[in-house]
Image (cartoon, helix red, strand yellow):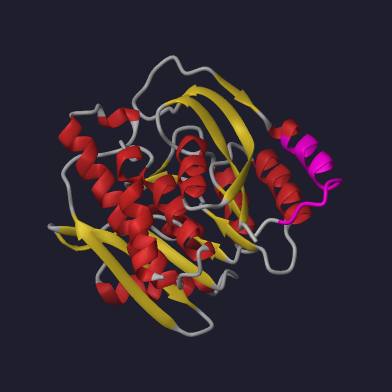
Amino acid sequence: MQKTAAAIHDFSGFGKCSLTVILPVLSAAGIACSAAPTAILSSHTGGLENVYSQDFTEGLRGFARQWTELPLFFDAIYTGYMSSPEQVAACSELTEALRKPGTLFVADPALGDNGTLYRGVSESTASAMAQFCCRADLILPNLTEAAFLLGEEPNLSPTRPQVEELLQKLAALGPRRVAITGVSFSPRKIGAACYDALSRETAFAFAPCIEGHYHGTGDLFGAALIGGMLRGLQLREAMQAAVSFVSRCVWRTKQNGTDPRFGLDFEEELPYYLHALSIIV
């Protein structure tokens, strides 16, 4: 039977991030993906001006009312950016309404990067997101978000033992599994680290570090990782496939000369991603 997923993220009409990368990546992996937008934007906000944005908090509650009346089952629920404590509450209502035994609940905190909160993310939103993530099965913070979830000062250059400690502390908040992105112990390599509290297994995955800042990498990583897990891969295997895929997408974008503000040129790398999944399977 075909696997299914529900993606609860913002939708940007221009700029490849959130739903505009999650839907095609999961679809390419053979997963039927439904979408519930948290906000509608003319483009993403990273480096782009005069962005039109419409909050969709009440719309999420409307989605919850209708979707719960349908005979729906989602193998995975994947949540991302939320703009306010009220929106976190609405996403929590929708998630709890859709979540059933056997559903993998994956939460990307989407709070900040490079040691600071994103523009427009308040301390109260960060606190509400931390509580929300406690109920997830798997969380996908970057190093900055991991620190905010724990109420600590961000350390953007942790050692391997510090990353392992960070993973375990995050898992102690509630989620059984954690994957942290932006991990690097060398200028030449960057990737992710994961931890499973049940097996107490820690794993790392790295790929070549490519100079530049590219928007949408976290969303692409999350979609690729979930696609791998729903195809039967273990967390560490899905993480390696996702890290390699994102790295190739960054390389492709740089080779194409695409403005990094516009997102990653991932489309031409989808065959590589699917091949990677089939090799590991």
Is residue 154 visible to the viewer in this orientation of the structure?
no
Residue 186: x percent and y percent? 15, 63
Q: Residue furthest right?
A: 69
Horizontal arrangement in the rendering, residue 248 relative to residue 39 (left or right)? left
The x, y position of residue 221, in whole percent, is 40, 52
Residue at the outermost top position: 50
Q: Quadrant of residue 258?
A: top left
Left or right of 252? Residue 265 is right
Image quadrant in which you'd find residue 36: top right
Q: Nearer the viewer, residue 125 or 167?
A: 167
Q: Give percent across and percent down for residue 205.
A: 29, 67
Q: Residue at x 25, y 63 (%)?
A: 206
Q: Which residues are magenta?
A: 60-73
Residue at 74% across, 47% down: 94
Is 68 a magenta residue?
A: yes
User: Which residue occupies the foreground of this view, 47 or 60?
Assistant: 60
Q: Residue at x 46, y 70 (%)?
A: 233
Q: Look at the image and tell me whether residue 132 can be seen.
A: yes
| Rendered residue at 20%/40% (across/down) | 212
Q: Nearer the viewer, residue 3 or 164?
A: 3
From the image, which quarter does the C terminus lie in? bottom left
**Residue 59: x %, y % from top left:** 73, 31
Q: Is residue 137 above or below residue 216?
A: below
Q: Give the residue furthest to the bottom.
A: 199
**Magenta includes 94?**
no
**To which quarter of the image does residue 182 belong?**
bottom left
In which quadrant of the rendered image does the N terminus lie? bottom right
Looking at the image, is 26 positioned above or below residue 188? above
